[in-house]
Amino acid sequence: MPIDQRPLAVFLMGPTASGKTALACALSDRFAVDLVSVDSALVYRGMDIGTAKPDAAMLARYPHRLIDIRDPAAPYSAADFRHDAMAAMHDITSQGRVPLLVGGTGLYFRALQQGLSQLPEADPVIRERLAAEAATVGWPALHARLRQLDAAAAGRIGPNDAQRIQRALEVIGLTGRPLSEQQQGGSGQRFPWRVLKLALLPSDRTPLHQRIAQRFDAMLAAGFLDEVRALRARGDLHADLPAIRAVGYRQAWEHLDGQTSAAEFRDRGIFATRQLAKRQITWLRGELDARVLDPDRAGWQGLAEDALQLFLEGGEEARERVV
């Protein structure tokens, strides 16, 4: 078998609050890796507390690429991420270092490694019709329709994710084929890196749920609502923007609109975060070539370090041993 000469990249994946950032920083202390964020919310400037963004001191010590690269008023797509991540990875590799991509946005990881299929352009007529219908029956009702037409896509999309529900139904309407089926096509080009995948998957979700609740309360104590008030005060942001639909921010926006009490806001924010974690775990279980690590088991960080060490030293043979 010929030796794979592609440079190494590491994908460190896991649900929210699973300890990805801490592990990424620990690996960067030991290995010649540079960190690249794979998170659809961390790209936005001014959204720090509610996204659990690493603070300035941590970013100074452990720089992450693709953090704070967009204004919340501007959308950021999987295609944008793939372009930016590939550029960052090429730059890191050219310096003789290993790109370590860390985050929980499965769509971004998939788009990066598999490429993007050629989907039809947006159709303003269909989009307007779907938006008008959603204004009458609500996006959860359209999500139920999507589940009937494309259960796989509906399983990855939340019932209130207006942008993605609209796009999935739009593609089905334009092509007559499920979006999930078309997304499997990819670009057809070989990924330029050989990849070690590390997936943080808790065997028991109870500790994860406890961390989610504790972290949400810590965000509130740190001034999360004041952060959202500052975003609202800009005047150019609204609840339908992808940035504001991020978990926690949507619930905070609704609370500040007077739709929920403080207690209801907290409960909804924690529940939405738990649902996000559930979707992330479901996606990760499909990553069959990943080395699974339980963040609540003793020694899990050492296993990650050993896997990376073997991969760096032994190439393909080590890959078979650790993946």
Image (cartoon, grey):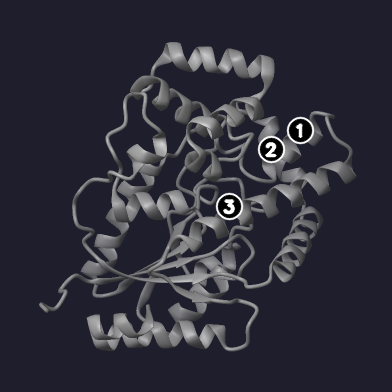
How far apart in space, not on screen, are marks 2 and 1 (Cα)? 6 Å
Position of residue 58 measured from the top left corner of the image (x, y, whole percent) = 56, 69
Q: Amino acid at mark 2?
A: Arg
Q: Amino acid at mark 3?
A: Arg
Position of residue 128 measured from the top left corner of the image (x, y, whole percent) = 51, 13
- Of pointers 3 and 1, the one earlier in the residue sequence: 1
Question: Is the residue 196 above or below the residue 221 in the image?
Answer: below
Q: Is residue 243 left or right of residue 112?
A: right
Q: Are marks 3 and 1 in contact (CB under 8 Å)?
A: no
Question: Is the residue 213 above or below the residue 178 in the image?
Answer: below
Q: Determine which residue is flagged by label 3.
A: 279
Which quadrant of the figure contains the N terminus?
Answer: bottom left
Q: Amino acid at mark 1?
A: Glu
Question: Is the residue 63 above or below the residue 1 in the image?
Answer: above
Q: Determine which residue is flagged by label 2.
A: 250
Mark nearer the viewer, 2 or 3: 3
